[in-house]
């Protein structure tokens, strides 16, 4: 018996000694094999500083591993330390049990040149060596347990050589306490990524393997948007992009139906500034968004609050392009095509497409400023709007809305707007009430130069407008209030779109207090391909000004309460021997107008049948003499009156055709 025990003892001792020798030798052997045959294994030169293997504890320690680029000089990827421990005695029971896996100091550089990456040859190497067809994919029955997984201080960089852009992840740390493959077991883990140009991303996740429920929380702290400059180049072409993002987003749901997850959280952006070659395009101090819930299954987005402060924006228009079109290049694929494809995918997956529903409980924009610059006009038009404040509650894409806006205009004017309407079908119903007060009209001079050829030299402008759209029909009532308007002479270097007697019209429209009040209705069908609101405005205003300027006597007569019916024509029977009381009254009104305004002149044309005898001709001359005498007696100056005689056409009314004009140089 003692002999048996002795032999057994010696046998165990020899085995232990052999295992110890193998453990000691396995590390150097593995190191030498990797250094000598790395290219056969992965298709690249491989170098490792140390390999340690302990068969007793099931621990493997590798330090200083590097995989080189194809040139064998530069390092493609590597790490400082890989430390793994496993329970070898569990292998016979078809279980892989890793007590810990630690990878420290991982570094990798990914280079893309066109369609090729600097690791493409490695993929081809592995693919070329694997010619085994796919076999049975039923579960193997193995149980794999991973615990205490850690990735610490990893650095990854990506570079697109053709586009000159890249991304650096400066400090990646991953923590997974444990997960099991082949059995139901709860899992949790966390990931922390530091970005080279500032900011940190952290992710925490929990998974209930029994119910398949999951919960994920994502936090982004002080993320510098400049990290994405290279990747946003296809979307935004700018000189520089600054700003920091803080976010907290959470998602809860079931892995069996991810679309029914509940998503909420908040996003805050500070100091955003998008700069193009001419300066800052869009910037703001702060943007805060509070997300109540996002329901992907029903395509519903419930936003509790959006607060935007200190917004500044600049829009510049040239004939061929704008700063926004330069900032946002034309996409390679049309947006409508992409949307239709996405909608088609949604229909195929869900059986039907659900319209997007967005609701914002509280929207506030404070202390905003917008500047519009138009370089297409003969004179540059620059119109800064400051102090913009916008508010809306319960804003939705599927129902009625109301909002308010106020702002300060250049030169001290103010604007206020109240809106009620729909966003999903805007042509169905819209109501808008707008007031503009105290606008310095000189700010609008580049527009009047372009449209009429005349600059505005003085004036204060006010506008009250009520706009209604019902089933695509526009009904717009405007009241224009102008005080002390004065325009300059027509510019010879400008070919205006409309030749309007603007100076004359303004003169006629003014009352005794140098004030103008104009009622201007505008109507149209917004579905018409020729519909253009600003063209309608100018056309309506132009027709009004032409009407006033071509018959200033009628306009002045109405303004003075004299009536305008007899200011264009006084009917006279060719055979009457004198003037009637009605005709004297009409002539008296003309004299009153001439006395009220010395710039007003009258060209009166006597229209009578052809004179068949000298007595008829003398009869017409006596009528003319009566008209002249009466007008002079009533105070009309000689220089304000000019009478001529013409033969009337057959069927034409007989009498005096009156053309009034103002002696004003346009």
Image (spheres, rainbow, N blue to C red):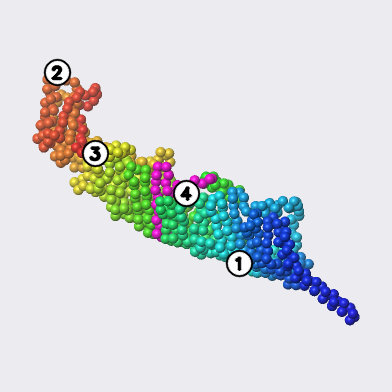
Find the magenta span and give its range.
308-333
Quick one: SS at disc 4? Answer: loop
* Whole-number angstrom distance, CA of label 4 to CA of label 2: 82 Å
On screen, 296 above or below 638?
A: below
Q: Where residue 78 sits in the image (x, y, percent)?
A: 64, 62
> Which residue position is annotated with label 2?
613
Which of the image's four quarters has the N terminus? bottom right
Name the residue at 51% across, 58% down.
227
Can residue 265 be seen here? no
Mark 4 touches mark 2? (CB < 8 Å): no
Image depth: mark 1 or mark 4 in front? 1
Q: Earlier in the sequence, mark 4 or mark 2?
A: 4
* Left or right relative to 210: residue 277: left
Quick one: SS at disc 3? Answer: loop
Image depth: mark 4 or mark 3 in front? 4
Q: Where residue 159 sits in the image (x, y, percent)?
A: 57, 55
Q: Where residue 544 sits in the image (x, y, percent)?
A: 28, 39
Depth check, front residue: 195 or 425: 195
Q: Where residue 652 sits in the image (x, y, percent)?
A: 23, 25
Mark 2 touches mark 3? (CB < 8 Å): no
Q: Earlier in the sequence, mark 1 or mark 3?
A: 1
> Which residue position is annotated with label 3?
666
Quick one: SS at disc 1? Answer: strand
Depth check, front residue: 398 or 180: 180
* Whole-number angstrom distance, CA of label 4 to CA of label 3: 44 Å
Q: Earlier in the sequence, mark 2 or mark 1?
A: 1
Hey, which residue is sitting farthest bottom in the picture?
2
Name the residue at 40% across, 50% down.
315
* Whole-number angstrom distance, CA of label 2 to CA of label 1: 120 Å
> Which residue position is annotated with label 4?
328
């Amino acid at each position: 018996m003692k002999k048996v025990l002795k032999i057994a003892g010696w046998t165990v001792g020899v085995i232990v000694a052999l295992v110890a020798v193998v453990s000691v030798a396995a590390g150097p052997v593995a190191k030498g094999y990797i250094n000598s045959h790395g290219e056969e294994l992965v298709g690249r030169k491989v170098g490792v500083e140390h390999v340690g293997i302990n068969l007793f504890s099931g621990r493997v320690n590798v330090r200083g591993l590097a995989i080189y680029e194809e040139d064998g000089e530069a390092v493609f990827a590597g790490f400082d330390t890989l430390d793994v421990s496993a329970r070898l005695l569990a292998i016979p029971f078809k279980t892989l049990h890793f007590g810990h896996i630690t990878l420290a100091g991982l570094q990798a550089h990914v280079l893309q040149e066109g369609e090729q990456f600097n690791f493409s040859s490695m993929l081809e190497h592995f693919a070329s060596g694997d010619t085994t067809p796919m076999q049975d994919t039923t579960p193997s029955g193995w149980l794999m347990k991973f615990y205490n997984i850690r990735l610490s201080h990893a650095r990854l960089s990506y570079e697109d050589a053709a586009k000159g852009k890249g991304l650096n992840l400066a400090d990646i740390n991953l923590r997974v306490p444990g997960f099991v493959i082949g059995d139901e077991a709860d899992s949790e883990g966390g990931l922390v990524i530091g970005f080279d140009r500032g900011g940190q991303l952290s992710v925490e996740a929990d998974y209930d393997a029994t119910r398949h429920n999951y919960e994920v929380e994502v936090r982004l702290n002080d993320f510098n948007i400049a990290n994405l400059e290279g990747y946003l180049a296809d979307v935004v072409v700018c000189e520089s992009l600054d700003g920091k993002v803080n976010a907290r987003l959470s998602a809860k749901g079931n892995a069996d139906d991810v679309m029914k997850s509940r998503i909420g959280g908040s996003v805050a952006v500070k100091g955003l500034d998008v700069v193009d070659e001419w300066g800052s395009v869009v910037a703001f101090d702060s943007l805060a968004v509070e997300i109540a819930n996002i329901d992907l299954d029903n395509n519903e987005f419930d936003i509790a609050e959006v607060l935007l402060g200190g917004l500044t924006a600049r829009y510049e228009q040239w004939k061929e392009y704008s700063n926004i079109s330069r900032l946002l290049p034309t996409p390679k694929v049309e947006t409508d095509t992409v949307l239709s494809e996405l909608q088609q995918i949604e229909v195929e997956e869900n059986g039907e497409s659900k319209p997007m529903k967005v609701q914002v409980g509280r929207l506030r924009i404070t202390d905003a400023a917008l500047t519009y610059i138009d370089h297409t006009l003969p004179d540059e038009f620059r119109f800064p709007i400051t102090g913009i404040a916008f508010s809306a509650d319960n804003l939705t894409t599927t129902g009625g809305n109301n909002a308010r806006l106020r702002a300060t205009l250049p030169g001290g004017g103010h604007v206020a707007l109240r809106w009620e309407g729909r966003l999903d079908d805007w042509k169905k119903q819209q109501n808008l009430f707008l007031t503009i007060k105290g606008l310095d009209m000189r700010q609008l001079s580049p527009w009047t130069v372009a449209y009429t050829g005349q600059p505005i030299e003085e004036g204060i402008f006010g506008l009250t407008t009520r706009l209604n759209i019902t089933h695509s029909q526009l009904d717009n009532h405007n009241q224009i209030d102008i005080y002390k308007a004065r325009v300059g002479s027509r510019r010879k270097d400008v070919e205006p779109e409309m030749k309007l007697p603007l100076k004359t019209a303004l003169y006629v429209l003014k009352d005794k207090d140098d004030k103008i009040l104009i009622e201007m209705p505008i109507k149209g069908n917004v579905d018409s391909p020729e519909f253009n609101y600003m063209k309608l405005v100018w056309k309506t205003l132009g027709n009004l000004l032409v009407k006033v300027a071509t018959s200033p006597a009628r306009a002045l007569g109405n303004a003075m309460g004299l009536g305008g019916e007899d200011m264009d024509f006084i009917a006279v029977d060719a055979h009457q021997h004198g003037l009637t009381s009605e005709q004297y009254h009409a002539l008296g009104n003309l004299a009153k107008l001439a006395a009220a305004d010395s710039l007003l002149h009258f060209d009166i044309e006597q229209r009578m049948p052809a004179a068949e005898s000298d007595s008829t001709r003398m009869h017409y001359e006596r009528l003319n003499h009566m008209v002249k005498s009466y007008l002079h007696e009533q105070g009309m100056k000689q220089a304000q009156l000019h009478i001529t005689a013409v033969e009337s056409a057959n069927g034409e009314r007989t009498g005096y055709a009156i053309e009034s004009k103002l002696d004003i140089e346009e």
